[in-house]
Amino acid sequence: MPLCGQKSSVCCAVLSVWGGIQLGITGALIYTGSPAFIEDIPLAENANWSPQEWETNLHAGYQQSALNCWIAALLYLVTFCVSTHQYWANYNTGDQFKVTIGSMRFY
């Protein structure tokens, strides 16, 4: 059952691939501890933390942010699957009502 047209399903599929790749790479960079993402790591500021506690909390924040990126990339994969299904559904409905020579019977 088609819910959207062929062109919109192709557009959604392309955007899903792009978003999935982008978030996958971003998640990998965050997981490796890239300093470019230090401002995106949620940390509760506490002046009483020892350097070891700072390192532990920073590492946990990096891992949580990477996991969030990978979950979003998987959601883009789901969107890609729905989009390709919609493209397939639209492609097949065009042939559903066509008359073929083998189906015509003359009595």
Image (spheres, rainbow, N blue to C red):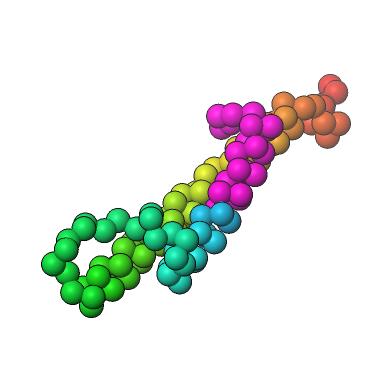
Query: What secondary structure is the magenta-colored segment mainly?
Result: helix
Total residue callouts: 0
- What residue is shown at x 51% (from left), y 55% (from top)? 23
Say which residue appears at 17% left-offset and 61% top-offset: 46
Q: Furthest-front residue in view?
A: 47
Q: Residue furthest bottom?
A: 52
Whether residue 84 is visible here, answered yes or no, is no
* Viewer-proximal residue among 97 and 8: 8
Is residue 8 highlighted in magenta? yes
Q: Quadrant of the N terminus?
A: top right
Residue 22 coordinates in the image, percent (x, y): 56, 54
Q: Is residue 14 above or below residue 68?
A: above
**Is residue 46 shown left or right of residue 6?**
left
The answer to which image quadrant residue 98 occupies is: top right
Residue 14 sits above or below residue 70 on the image: above
- Span shown in magenta: 1-20
Q: Residue at x 68, y 32 (%)?
A: 6
